[in-house]
Amino acid sequence: RLEPVLAHMARQSPGTKRLLLVSHDQASVARFALRAGADGVVLLRSLASDLHPAIEALLRNETFVSAGIVVKASLMSNS
């Protein structure tokens, strides 16, 4: 259900960046959101520290993923 919503947003406002707030720190959630069309993913528990850097990254046309997600994914890939 996420893909159609993000696709609709992209059609309605092509230049608008889509930043998703998520409560799960699983890398699969971030990958799914990015594949669905999100430009960035921020963990809710990291909102205070990650929101500003996420917005700055998106304004530079970069993808942003909260470090808590990236660190967990990195640890899982090393095991």
Image (cartoon, rainbow, N blue to C red):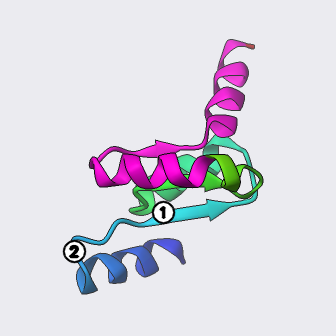
Q: Is residue 78 left or right of residue 12?
A: right
Q: Would you say the residues marked 1 and 2 are in contact, meaning their CB atoms lie under 8 Å apart?
A: no
- The kind of residue tagged 2 is Pro
In this rendered view, identify the residue nearer to me: 53 or 22.
Answer: 53
Q: Please name the residue shown 42% across and 79% down the image.
A: 4
> What x and y, as percent, mark residue 24?
75, 53
Give the x, y percent position of residue 18: 42, 66
Does dot 1 land on a helix, a strand or a loop? strand
Residue that label 1 marks: 19
Which residue: 54% across, 78% down? 1
Can you say whether 69 is above or below 16 in the image?
above
Say which label, 1 or 2, has the lower sequence index: 2
- Please give the residue where the numbered disc 2 appears in the rendered image: 14
Q: Alpha-carbon neighbours of circle 1 within 10 Å: few (<14), some, or many (≥20)?
A: many
Q: Which residue corresponds to the image point at 53% horizontal and 43% vertical from the top-left?
A: 65
Give residue 3's position: percent from left, percent from top: 44, 72
Residue type highlighted by circle 1: Leu
Q: Is residue 24 above or below residue 62?
A: below
Of 43 and 36, nearer the camera is: 43
Part of the protein shown in magenta? 50-78
Measure the alpha-carbon separation of dots 1 and 2. Answer: 14 Å
